């Protein structure tokens, strides 16, 4: 009765079973996988947010495949703040970054075509690709005093069926930004092999060194699609507002935009109240980002302080984003370690294999978890890893 692509293994894995048992027990869990900013104790200006959703203009339906112009203009201003000139005509509003991915996958790929994705990387891609009949091929990020794209391996991974390269900038969970020399190598490969670049910039504003980051929105050497949204930029995942920016050589970009218009017109997904509120939500991002970066800095300092006092674990360098990778002794699988942490220490972390780390010995911790939870969770992780 059902399509083969839906033949997922729906049985719970050991970790989710342990988590369900823990939740049922009613005991307090220190959740170091936290990724929902609305549950992490940040302050939001509720009145301004709700007032922005009460715009009388929302009583009129104005269908536009790219989304309301007022919201797209606010997105162009966001990019002006990053020194990138983006035209509102090249922007498509979507309800999530995932939806933006689906538009791009549908635009670029026939069933069975390939897209390159970074490893380690964010697990969402596998599901998106399965649903959309795309094959994912991993290219490695290598760690040597910081993460880098292995451009040689990336090039080797290209086949006649490759349609594009996905970059996550900065990457989740490694926190690595694509550097100017990596961008150049990427453009060289993509130009030569007629591949598109798909740049996920949901964490772009969360760099730790304070400098304005380079955005792929100004990359016009290869056909480029950039996606981001309010979910991370303004900490408002519940508003379901994201965007897709097309850039690249003019003629190619124009064709892409025309075709995307048909895809987007088929769904007309974003709703009027949220589109009308988007300029306000984008203005609110400054206050949110300040709080979030303060939390992340504080948690990183706490982690470093605790790591200094022991010898078993270390952390990998991180340049931005909401996560940090902890290197732990590989005396057991990451899954075993995560299970033991739930069952015997009431701490929930993501094992590295969840993000396609090539070996055991990695845990991923959320840096946006509340300070007290983070500090106590780290203390318990280090206590367990030093006792085994
Ligand atoms: C790298 C990356 N891309 C996309 C998303 C999803 O964003 P959205 O809520 O806009 O679909 C996430 C969510 O954590 C993410 O980590």
Image (spheres, rainbow, N blue to C red):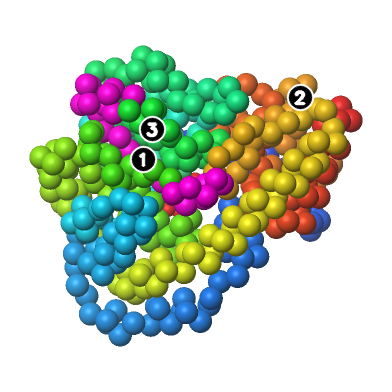
Instruction: Specify the farthest residue to the bottom.
Output: 56
Residue at 40% across, 20% down: 151
Judged from the image, the secondary structure of the residue bearing numbered disc 3 is: helix
Give how far apart the Cα atoms at labels 1 and 2 are.
Answer: 33 Å
Disc nearer the start of the sequence (1/2): 1
> In the image shown, does 340 or 186 lie closer to the viewer?
186
Q: Nearer the viewer, mark 3 or mark 1?
A: 3
Q: Is residue 292 above or below residue 356?
A: below
Q: Is residue 80 above or below residue 315?
A: below
Residue 325 spot, x, y in % from top left = 64, 35
Q: Nearer the viewer, mark 2 or mark 3?
A: 3
Q: Which residues are magenta?
A: 185-212
Q: If the image is split into quadrants, where does the N terminus sit?
A: top left
Give the total number of marks visible in the rendering: 3
Residue 228 spot, x, y in % from top left = 39, 51
* Residue placed under numbered mark 1 in the picture: 199
Residue 86 spot, x, y in % from top left = 25, 53
Q: Per the image, is 197 magenta?
A: yes
* Residue placed under numbered mark 2 in the picture: 329
Residue at 47% across, 79% down: 48
> Callout 3: few (<14), some (14-19), or many (20+) C-alpha neighbours within 10 Å?
few
* Residue placed under numbered mark 3 in the picture: 180
> Callout 2: few (<14), some (14-19), or many (20+) C-alpha neighbours within 10 Å?
some
> Callout 1: few (<14), some (14-19), or many (20+) C-alpha neighbours within 10 Å?
many
> In the image shown, does 269 or 301 lie closer to the viewer?
301
Q: Where is residue 156, by image quadrant? A: top left
Q: Where is residue 110, by image quadrant? A: top left
Give how far apart the Cα atoms at labels 3 and 1 are.
Answer: 14 Å
Q: Is residue 103 left or right of residue 35?
A: left
> In the image shown, does 12 or 363 lie closer to the viewer?
363
């Amino acid at each position: 009765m059902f399509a083969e692509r839906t033949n997922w293994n729906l049985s719970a894995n050991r970790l989710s079973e342990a988590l369900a048992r823990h939740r049922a027990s009613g005991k307090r869990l220190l959740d170091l996988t936290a990724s929902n900013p609305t549950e992490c104790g940040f302050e939001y200006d509720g009145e301004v947010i709700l007032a922005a959703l009460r715009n009388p203009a929302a009583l009129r339906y104005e269908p536009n495949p790219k989304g309301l112009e007022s919201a797209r203009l606010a997105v162009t201003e966001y990019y002006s703040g990053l020194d990138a000139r983006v035209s509102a005509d090249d922007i498509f509003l979507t309800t999530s970054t995932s939806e933006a991915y689906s538009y791009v996958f549908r635009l670029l790929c026939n069933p069975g075509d390939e897209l390159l994705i970074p490893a380690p990387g964010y697990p969402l891609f596998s599901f998106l690709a399965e649903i959309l009949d795309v094959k994912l091929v991993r290219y490695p990020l290598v760690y040597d005093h910081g993460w880098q794209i292995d451009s040689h391996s990336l090039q080797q991974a290209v086949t006649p069926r490759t349609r594009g390269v996905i970059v996550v900038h900065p990457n989740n969970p490694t926190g690595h930004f694509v550097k100017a020399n990596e961008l150049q190598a990427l453009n060289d490969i993509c130009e030569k092999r007629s591949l598109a670049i798909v740049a996920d910039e949901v964490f772009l504003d969360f760099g730790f060194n304070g400098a304005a980051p380079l955005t792929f929105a100004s990359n016009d050497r290869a056909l480029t699609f950039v996606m981001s949204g309010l979910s991370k930029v303004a900490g408002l995942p519940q508003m379901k507002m994201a965007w897709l920016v097309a850039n690249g050589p003019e003629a190619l970009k124009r064709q892409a935009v025309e075709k995307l218009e048909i895809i987007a017109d088929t769904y007309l997904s974003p709703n009027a109240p949220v589109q009308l509120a988007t300029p306000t939500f984008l203005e609110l991002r400054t206050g949110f980002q300040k709080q979030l970066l303060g939390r992340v800095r504080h948690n990183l300092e706490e982690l470093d302080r605790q790591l200094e006092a022991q010898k078993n674990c270390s952390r990998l360098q991180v340049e931005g984003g909401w996560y940090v990778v902890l290197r732990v002794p590989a005396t057991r699988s990451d899954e075993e370690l995560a299970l033991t942490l739930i069952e015997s220490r009431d701490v929930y972390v993501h094992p590295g294999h969840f993000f396609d780390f090539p070996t055991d010995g990695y845990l991923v911790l959320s840096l946006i978890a509340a300070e007290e939870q983070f500090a106590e969770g780290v203390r318990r992780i280090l206590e367990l890893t030093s006792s085994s």
